[in-house]
Amino acid sequence: MPRKRKTVKYIMLKRELWPLVKKGIKKITIRRSVRFSEGEEVLIHAGGKIVGRARITNIYRKKMKSIGAEEAEKEGIPLPRLKKMLENTYGKNPEQELTVVEFELVEVFDPPLDPEKEYYGDKSPQEIAEEALKKGMVKDPFEREVLKKLAEGKSIREIAFELGGLEKRKIIRRIVRKYGECLSATS
């Protein structure tokens, strides 16, 4: 049964970057924008799992052209590689402002936590969608469409891409949690 929980913020990392965080080498992430605050604790996701918890220690804005050796060292990679990664992710505009988020690792989850179990309890997003649709709980057309796609076996990631990009995953997850909580309240 899904637990009532406060919204948890998280940092998504590529699987290959997690070992650098664990070793204390990678201490920052660079994003276009963030919703974090200094002192806030966030979960770290990598490889489809929740692998740890970190505390945000500093946040600052910097133009892409000004990202330098200090950031490369805190990323744990050579500066030319960092610049190339940033260009591939955010484009080649040297005047673009990016947000540098410094963090410290607080806890490592070993074994890693399964996000679906943490967020949705004993049911998968597909099971929640199927049951909510079957019980006629879904009145909103957009939510119904999202849940239909989940019930058909599409992943949250696939649906997010169909809706315009990975940042849409949070909308889909919110819908799944909403109906997961509704189903658990009625059982």
Image (spheres, rainbow, N blue to C red):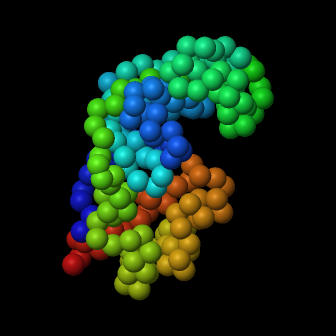
Query: In the drawing, does residue 158 fall left or right of residue 17?
Result: right
Q: Position of residue 81 (x, y in %)?
A: 68, 28
Quick one: quadrant of the C terminus? bottom left
> Can you say whether 71 is above or below 115 in the image?
above
Residue 101 in view (yes/no): no
Residue at image location 66% in from the left, 63% down from the top: 162
- Residue 32 x %, y %: 60, 31
Q: Is residue 55 visible?
A: yes
Q: Which residue is drawn at 29% across and 66% down?
A: 121
Residue 99 picture quarter: top right
Residue 154, image x and y in percent?
56, 72
Q: Which residue is drawn at 53% across and 26% down?
A: 76
Q: Quadrant of the N terminus?
A: bottom left
| Left or right of 14 on screen, residue 56 | left
Front one among 81 and 38: 81
Q: How many labels does the image show?
A: 0
**Could you say which quadrant of the image residue 44 lies in?**
top left
